[in-house]
Structures are given as C-alpha cells and as structure tokens.
Amino acid sequence: MSIAIIAAALTVRAAWPAPAMDPATRQLAHDIFKQLIEINTTDSVGNVTTAAQAMAQRLLDAGFPQADVTVVGPNDRKRNLVARYRGSGHSRHKPVLIIGHLDVVEARREDWTSDPFEFVEKDGYYYGRGTQDMKVSDAVAVTDFIRLKRAGFVPDRDIILALTADEEGGKSNGVDWLLKNHRELIDAEFALNPDAGGVVMDSGRPVSMEFEATEKLYADFQVTALNPGGHSSLPKPDNAIYHVADALAKLERAPFPLELNEVTRGYFTAMAATQTGQTAADMRAILADPPDTAAAERLSQDARYNSTLRTTCVATMMNAGHAPNALPQRAEANVNCRIFPGHSQEEIRLALVKLFDDPKLSVRYMSDAREVFEHGSERKAMAPPPLNPEVMDALRGATQTLWP
Ligand SMILES: [Zn+2]
C-alpha cells in the first residue's frame, strides 16, 4: 500500500451513516471480495492470472462483450484484466481509467491467527490478505461495473478498469507492461487509483477525506568508508566508523529545506480548518510568503507533516568492522530517502555528498535489487498534475453524500 504522502484534504463536517445499499448488490460485492481474497496472488506461489480471469468471467456474465474484456500479460501467472465500459460517445473526452492491483504481499500462515487466503468474518472485521490492500477496492470496482451495467447506465465517455499484477513486488508490473505493450487499451484522460487516501476517522468521527496527486520518489544510498585498518591497540584518528558516524550525525542535524506545491498548499489550507490553537496557526503560517520557519519547525515535530513538507533522508542500516580488536577496514550505512516531487535521485545524492563534505566517503545509489551504482537516476518525481475540477467536484460530491 502506498502511504498518502503528497495528500490533499477535503474537510468533512459531521458523521452520518452512508445511504443503505440494496441487499443484492451488497451480496455481490461480498462474494467478489471473498473470491478475490481466496485466490492467492502473492509473487512466490500465487497466480494473478487466476484472479484476472475470475473477474473477467464476472464481467462477461454481466453482459460485457468479449471484445471489451481482455486478460493480457507477459506470462501465465502475471496477466492483467482490462475491461472497457463503452460510453455513448457523446462526450469528446478521452476515457476515465480506474486502476488497482490484484497481487498481495506475501503472508505466512504462522504469522496469522487465521489462514490469510481464507475469507473470515469475525467480530465485525474481515480477515484475509488483501482485505485492505487492495482487494476490497478491486471488488468494489468490479461490483460497480456490474451494477451500472445491469441498471442500463451508459456513460458519455468510456470507462476503463485495469486490475494489474506485481504492484507489491515481482518483475512483471502490470501498469508498466500495459503502457509499453498495450497503451491503446488503457489510454485515458486521467486515472483514478483507490489504493491510497480515503476517509480519516478520529474516534469514529470522519475528519477529512484524503487523496494523493503524486508520490515521493524512493532512493537508497550506500555511504561507505574504506580504510587500511590496523590493530586496535594502536588507534589512528582516521577511522572508517568515525567517518560514517560523522556523516550520519550531520544528516540528523540538517533537514532538507521546506517545500510546498499546489497540492500540499491545498492540504494545509484545508487541514488548518480542522485544527485548533498552535497547530492551526502554524499550518496557516507556513503558507505565507515567505513561509514562517518557526512554524514549519514546530509542525515538523509530527513525522507526517515533516514528510509532507520536504525531502527526507534517514539512516536505516549500518554495517562496520570485522573484529572487536581490529581497526575497521570498512564502514557502511544505508541512507533511505523519500524525495519531494521535482527532484531526482542524483540531485539528492549530490546534496548528501556536499553535506557530508568528506573525501574519504563514497555515496552511491543502491537499486531495489541491491545493486550499487555510482549515480542515481536523473528522473524527477512527477510534479502533481493540476487539480482537475471534474475529479475534485465528483470527489467532494461523493464525500458529502457519504459523510455529509
Ligand atoms: Zn496497494
């Protein structure tokens, strides 16, 4: 699951129950949800194709033509479902794309109180791998396609549903594969993905509805010091562990600069209305030009606000030395960065080199496959797209209906 990092919030006023759903639709959603949970879609032993085909069959049974329901992918276990709900063509807009992933993170039976691939309802909760991330949303999307079709609804533009493989891991990311191999199937004006955001509750009271417009960029950097070493009875000032420790201490004391964009400005504007006292005042103060740095510092005590306001880099692993009575020949730390949209991995790597200011250290990029490279990618995290009134108005409307 993605964490809502670059979030924007719509404030909500009071708690009212959502309008009741008819029993048949409720049962259908439940059955699809159960079916998806009980198909193991982990990368190790699962099969995404089975889930994609099961959902395709549900759509075909509901009357979607074969030509509009496609199950495609790079291999037998990693096929994606793409279904097209035909519009009247009255709107000249390109389709709306709804995407979700079918795969789930690995789940070991011994870590669970129930079988993670058995759909269990107990004490008012659903148990099973993917109940939150994100088979519940997949089930809702498939159910909506079916009930709208049965109701005879015809949108004025096409709506595409893509349920994909390998979002959580694995080598066959479905969105990537579809973009490269079947762009025509998913080409759309904009995409909606229910994997992040949602209503935030405080003691059962809805406070805000959050969504993401982009995500921060992920990067690991390996900070290494090499040294000839020697016997620990004869210490020298030049010590590999001290070089890395000094660098990490600098990192701790030098947060990256405050940054705001259109989406985070909207977020703090809306959230200020839900807060009181110092926090509300600080949220307003950082939106001033120039931003109030003392206010930013106070807000940054909260890890969530801190990560919304800047690039963060933090030490996550260390490995150094080889014997208790020898001077270290090698010291190494992993620094994990979450990069604010608009900057690249390489830009942040160079910022770390400058901050550490130590020629004895190397700062290298480490890929997800733990391969080490001299440089990070120059690709920048996608800046958030402008807030589309079509999307925002619909989201506000739905929020007011469900949580007026
Ligand atoms: Zn997810």
Image: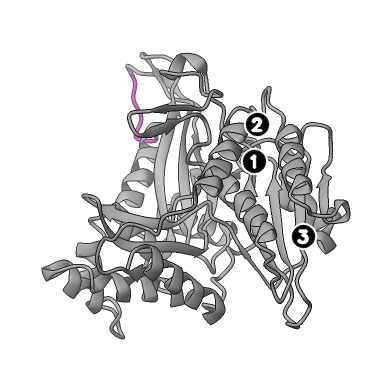
Residue 94 versus residue 18 in the image, above or below = below
Quarter of the image containing the C terminus?
bottom left
Looking at the rendering, the stretch of residues picked out in magenta corresponds to 234-238
Label 3 close to label 2 by CB (< 8 Å): no
Query: Which label sits on residue 41?
Result: 2
Q: Secondary structure at mark 3?
A: strand
Which callout, 3 or 1, points at the residue further toward the start of the chain? 3
Which callout, 3 or 2, points at the residue further toward the start of the chain? 2
Q: Find disc 1 in the rendering and name its residue.
A: 102
Instruction: Measure the alpha-carbon separation of dots 3 and 2.
Output: 23 Å
**Residue 255, quarter of the rendered image:** bottom left
Residue 157 versus residue 29 in the image, above or below = below
Q: Is residue 237 magenta?
A: yes
Q: Find disc 3 in the rendering and name its residue.
A: 84
Q: Amino acid at mark 2?
A: Thr
Give the image location of residue 354, x and y in percent: 46, 59
Q: Amino acid at mark 1?
A: Leu
Q: Secondary structure at mark 1?
A: loop
Image position of 55 (left or right of 126)? right
Q: Provide the major secondary structure of the magenta segment.
A: loop
**Residue 302, quarter of the rendered image:** bottom left
Q: Which is more foreground, mark 3 or mark 1?
A: 3
Task: Judge by depth and name the residue closer to the eye, 273 or 63.
Answer: 63
Question: Dot 3: few (<14), some (14–19), or many (≥20) neighbours within 10 Å?
Answer: many
Please report the residue visible at 69 percent of the width from the left and 72 percent of the height from the top.
155
Give the image location of residue 216, x and y in percent: 50, 58
Q: Is residue 203 magenta?
A: no
Please report the residue visible at 54 percent of the width from the left and 23 percent of the height from the top.
118
Q: Is residue 363 visible?
A: no
Image position of 393 (left or right of 31)? left
Please report the residue visible at 79 percent of the width from the left and 78 percent of the height from the top.
89
